[in-house]
Image (cartoon, grey):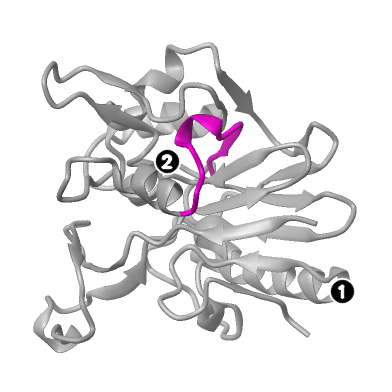
């Protein structure tokens, strides 16, 4: 049976500038943030199976007050040594999902992969696109090492890793987005990245301006929900401030 651990980095607002500003609901008000601000959780997930310790997306790459990568600290707090992660599955490379792909040495300024003993699974076309679009949504310096290390597997289209991790090209939120279904024979765990980011979005039909193909993304949400209902998927919601995981009955 798969063990699921949400690794929340906290709540943030984000507006058209693509800056992620921490949000504390005990003292902050959404109305005080710039017009059009969205409130989101930043929440990578750990899924532990009999075969692997899987990390799904890597958060913002922020450090905690002690200078430790927040993602590493979250793992340590759960009793997991970050060096024990075996696979890193990347839905896409926007900076709020890929900031923790690599980490910068505070003394030398050199970057290294945050999970050097893991194999990273990334869409090759998404990485190329990240370099082309370096700026607001993508930060090339954070993902540059993926093109230079041999512990990176480039994915294209749809397929399966090790017989139980299914990946599908989806291309709704950004041109080369992909989603993952982990099926260990007992549980089916679905990670839809930014095409199934919050429970509330799954239940409503709307086209979002921030999606590359908003109509396709809307249709994908409906497809995922129906498939998930039929097959008993557990959904992992990366941006949900209230509900990290859920099943649709």
Q: Which residue is mark 1?
A: 230
Residue 94 appears in the picture as rendered: no
Q: Quadrant of residue 163?
A: top right
Q: Which residues are magenta?
A: 78-91
| Residue 231 at x, y percent in the picture | 86, 68
| Residue 30 at x, y percent in the picture | 19, 84
**Mark drawn on residue 93:** 2
Residue 7 appears in the picture as rendered: yes
In magenta stretch: residue 123: no
Q: Nearer the viewer, residue 229 or 73?
A: 73
Q: Quadrant of the C terminus?
A: bottom right
C-alpha separation, residue under disc 2 versus residue under disc 1: 30 Å
Kindly identify the residue that appears in the image at 32 percent across and 41 percent down: 99
**Neighbours of disc 1 within 10 Å: few (<14), some (14-19), many (20+):** few
Kindly identify the residue that appears in the image at 46 percent across and 22 percent down: 116
Kindly identify the residue that appears in the image at 9 percent across and 84 percent down: 32
| Residue 152 at x, y percent in the picture | 55, 21
């Amino acid at each position: 049976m798969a063990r699921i651990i949400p690794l929340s980095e906290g709540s943030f607002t984000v507006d058209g500038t693509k800056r992620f500003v921490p949000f504390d609901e005990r003292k902050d008000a959404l109305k005080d943030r710039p017009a059009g601000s969205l409130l989101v959780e930043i929440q990578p997930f750990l899924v532990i199976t009999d075969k692997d310790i899987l990390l799904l997306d890597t958060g913002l790459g922020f450090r905690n007050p002690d200078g430790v990568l927040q993602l590493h600290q979250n793992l340590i707090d759960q009793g997991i040594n970050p060096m024990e992660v075996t696979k890193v599955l990347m839905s896409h490379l926007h900076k709020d999902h890929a900031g923790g792909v690599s980490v910068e040495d505070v003394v030398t300024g050199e970057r290294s992969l945050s999970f050097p003993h893991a194999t990273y699974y990334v869409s090759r076309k998404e990485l190329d696109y990240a370099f082309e679009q370096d700026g607001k949504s993508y930060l090339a310096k954070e993902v540059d090492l993926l093109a230079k290390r041999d512990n990176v597997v480039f994915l294209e289209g749809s397929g399966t890793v090790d017989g139980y991790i299914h990946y599908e090209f989806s291309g709704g939120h950004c041109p080369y987005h992909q989603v993952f279904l982990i099926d260990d024979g007992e549980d089916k765990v679905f990670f839809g990245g930014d095409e199934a980011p919050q429970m509330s979005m799954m239940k409503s039909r709307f086209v979002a301006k921030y999606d590359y193909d908003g109509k396709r993304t809307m249709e994908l949400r409906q497809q995922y929900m129906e498939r998930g209902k039929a097959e008993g998927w557990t959904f992992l919601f990366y941006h949900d401030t209230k509900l990290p995981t859920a099943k649709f009955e």
